[in-house]
Image (cartoon, rainbow, N blue to C red):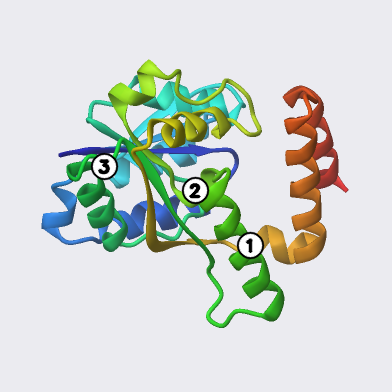
Amino acid sequence: MSVSIIIPTLNDEQAVKALLTCIRAWNDDTQKLIEEIIVVDATASKECQDMCTQHNAKWLSYKKNRGAQLKFGAAHAKAKVLWFLHADSGITPESLSDLNKAINNGSCGGFFKFKFNSAELSFSQKIITYFTNWRSKYFTAYGDQAIFVEKDFYNIHGGHSDQSLFEEVQLIKALRKNGQLHISNIPVAVSTRRWDKDGYWKRTLHNRLLALAYKFGVSTEKLSQWYTAKKVQ
């Protein structure tokens, strides 16, 4: 089995560098499972391009739209399995080993446990972590949980939606309906930088309100405007 790792990015060169450095430091046996690393850059950054060359990663430039970036990366992937990572994902060799085991045991795809990358979790972080993992177990997981999927399944079911928010919802629904969804007990560390900036409960409430609005049919274009407006403030 081989894996294509796909990383969308937008003005996040330092996080991409840290992630590529982490992956390329894994041992040779783990490296053999990686067919390629594809970075899909929304800003056509020369710095990002040079960084990819240094870490033996394929650099692609595509429009500013995370769902479209992920889909574009998948279209250029060679491996049987696609692994979608955020630039600030905290992953380990054990993550890839568990992914490999899940696919070999018949899963079509899956995702990992949510965990903040803090050395010691605060009370708020513990509560948010618990409910995030409960929600993703029974309902929807999002991209920061390092979703993986067989490429054939991805293509048959339409892959990511061509939108900048909630682009993975339909894919997770298809995997869950198929009955071959693997939920790993291995955590993927999620960066706290945006949570620290926004406030943990404020960001959680904002995310849940966006998800609720999406469920009730508010367009992703409108939701993106709300999301962008929040970041600018």
In the picture of the structure, the residue carrying the numbered disc 3 is 56
Tell me whether circle 3 and circle 2 mark residues in contact (CB < 8 Å).
Answer: no
In the picture of the structure, the residue carrying the numbered disc 1 is 131
In this rendering, is residue 75 above or below 195? above
The mark nearer the N terminus, 3 or 1, is 3
Residue 213 seen in this snapshot: yes
Relative to 147, 206 lies left or right: right
Residue 137 position in % (x across, y down): 51, 52
**Residue 205 falls in image quadrant:** bottom right
Residue 58 position in % (x across, y down): 32, 33
Q: What residue is drawn where x is 43% and y is 58%? A: 18
Relative to 171, 94 lies left or right: left
Task: Residue lying at the far right in this picture: please name it.
Answer: 233
Q: CA distance from mark 3 to mark 1?
A: 38 Å
In the picture of the structure, the residue carrying the numbered disc 2 is 87
The amino acid pointed to by label 3 is Asn
